[in-house]
Image (spheres, coloured by chain):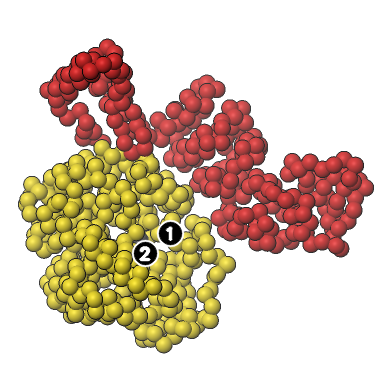
Chain colours: A red, B yellow
Amino acid sequence: MKHALNSLLNYTWPKHAGGVTWNQHTIAGAEPYKELSDKLSIEELLTDLFDTLNFSQFSILYNWANECSLEIDWNKLCQHYNLRWSEILKETIQAYLETPIEFQNWCFNKKLSARDLAPLLILENKDNTVLKLFSTLTPSKSEGTQLLDLICDLVSMGVKNLFPETEDTKKWFKKLYKLRHPQSTATDSQFSDKITAWPWPKDFNTDWKRTGDKSFIDISFKVENQNDFDKKLSQLNYVKDWANTNSPTWDQPKDNQ
Amino acid sequence: MTVFEKIFVHKNAVDSKVALRLKELNLNFEVVSEEPLQDKKGELSASEFDKSKKQLYVKKFEGQFFKRCPGAKPGLTCCNYFVLNLGQQCDMNCSYCYLQSFINSPLLTIYSNVDDSIAELEKMKQSMANDKFRIGTGEVIDSLSLDDLTLYSHDLIEFFKTVPNWQLEFKTKSDKVDHFLHLGPAKNVIVSWSLNPEFIVSSEEHGTASLANRLIAAKKCIDAGFKIAFHIDPVIWHENWKENYLGLVDQITKQFKPSDMPYISLGALRFQPEQRHIMKQRFGMKSLVNTAELFSSADGKLRYDQKLRQHMFDTIISAFKERDSKWNIFLCMEQPETWLAANKSLPKQTDGLESLFDHNLIRKHKKFSEIQS
Ligand code: SF4
């Protein structure tokens, strides 16, 4: 016996309410069934019973309808769920349905949109074992979408060994980011090494940072009074002069870049 | 000439010059009373986008032809450039093309009413003939790749000859110039080419003219009395970028003099982040633009690391200046700090480029548009 559509969609249905079928296909609940194909169109019934559906649920519905060989006006249905029935949506649904079930479950729980899943479209084989890890490592939605982007790029670039060393998602992200941005991470770490070697005063905190397309030295220090301020500025000046003499082109990337 | 799989002509454009030209060239078309494939409008899939390059639709344009360059946004240093849109989509196929995030129609559209666009310009001419407008036709369509079909260059060149203070720019990656050379000289008509080393042309700029052919076409335009300009854009990082871009500088400086062109503009690879998916689907992960290490920049576009961009720009600018200090180079679509680093001054303060960034003119045109609407 096939599962009722409502349970596939994770839509709760009151036990005592009996079930609903449309043309013998179980839409919701269990026996005794009420057959509604003579009263409502399938689109009307679906939108009446399942008022909102996220992308994962919509994909499951699409899959179910195809398995049942049901003719559905997807344009009409999409309008109700604030989607646009298009080639690209169809491709994304198909791609999503080909991913490992563990990944699908994570997407379902995190309510990912079709746009979030667009990176999948470049994968030749969507049933990739790396994606299974989403259900065990349970990254947040924003971590997960960034990881997915990196994984799809790296898999398509033929990069191997994408598995994490630990169960820490942040470390996994760092590893994948480095694999995807080998030159920039190497350059950033060269910059970082360079500035760490500078003669900073002990109570200055310095770090090489990147925000978007910009990388820079992040300096922080505390100032207690005017005298202290003068002192810190002259110390800073000393570091600047030191850098000018010892490393005049420190802010330029290496020529092999 | 570009071969289309299918050509549609709207019934409102059947008597247009383009439709007559299609007949003259024996190109079959279907006359339609409604826009075809309307159900496909919206975000296109990779294969739909590919197909849209092969289906031509000729129709009358009902909106305003003449607009300000969309690159003019806060945080970006952009010139006072205006655009005249005579169609949309392109028959060539560059991996980084920004149309991939812009086009939402499954058709390559050409507007049939070039006369209306000229009427619009005529109106402006009455009150602004002495202003220094710079107007380009290559914003959402290549200016010349289909011009051997439409011959729009003929009407535009003739019109611009009557407004010597205005500049018309045909921006292209094609080499289709022969059909309008007889209309020269026209010193306020600039034919400009986006240039890249041949290595990038063949790997990323599919269906475009080779670098050598673009340079030959540029020479022909100079000889016929047109001005030319070059845009080295987008600069694309790759292993041998330095060698290849210095080679490009060599090719340009050996064949042209600084006095042959008012400027050369430089820009590095950039695109909207949403565009990355369709680019990857269409060109795969062997493409240099898809494997590039890009970061989100102030305007939300993905770009190379700022220091790397600066380094590439510095290298190219220095190479030009070493060969002749008179080369006028400017950075288009760049943030002020990159400008400053490369030029030591902002564009409005750079000799020879002040007129490209005339904000009074921008305000004046805005006012004119408000009065008109
Ligand atoms: S020539 Fe220009 S418009 Fe045409 S595909 Fe290339 S970038 Fe796009």
Query: Where is residue B3, by image quadrant?
Result: bottom left
Q: Quadrant of the C terminus of chain B?
A: bottom left
Assign a secondary structure to mark 1: loop
Q: Is residue A107 visible?
A: yes
Asked whether, in this view, residue A103 is left or right of residue B172, the answer is right
Q: Is residue B182 above or below residue A10?
A: below
In the image, is the residue at mark 2 within 8 Å of ligand 1 by its beta carbon?
yes
Residue type at tag 1: Phe
B301 left or right, relative to B324:
right
Mark 1 and mark 2 in contact? Answer it, CB < 8 Å. Answer: yes
Query: In the picture, residue A223 is in which quadrant?
Result: top left
Expressed as whole percent of the image width and height from the top left, the position of residue A180 reads: 41, 35
Residue holding disc 1: B102
Please state if A155 lies on the left or on the right of B370 as rendered: right
How many numbered marks does the figure carry? 2
Residue under label 2: B140
Q: Quadrant of the N terminus of chain B?
A: bottom left
Q: Which residue occupies the foreground of this view, A191 or A199? A: A199
Mark 2: amino acid = Val
> Which circle's residue, 1 or 2, is located before the other in the chain?
1
Chain of the residue displaying label 2:
B
Determine the residue positioned at 45% across, 31% down: A176
Q: What residue appears at the point 90 percent right and 42 percent down from the top-left corner?
A: A16
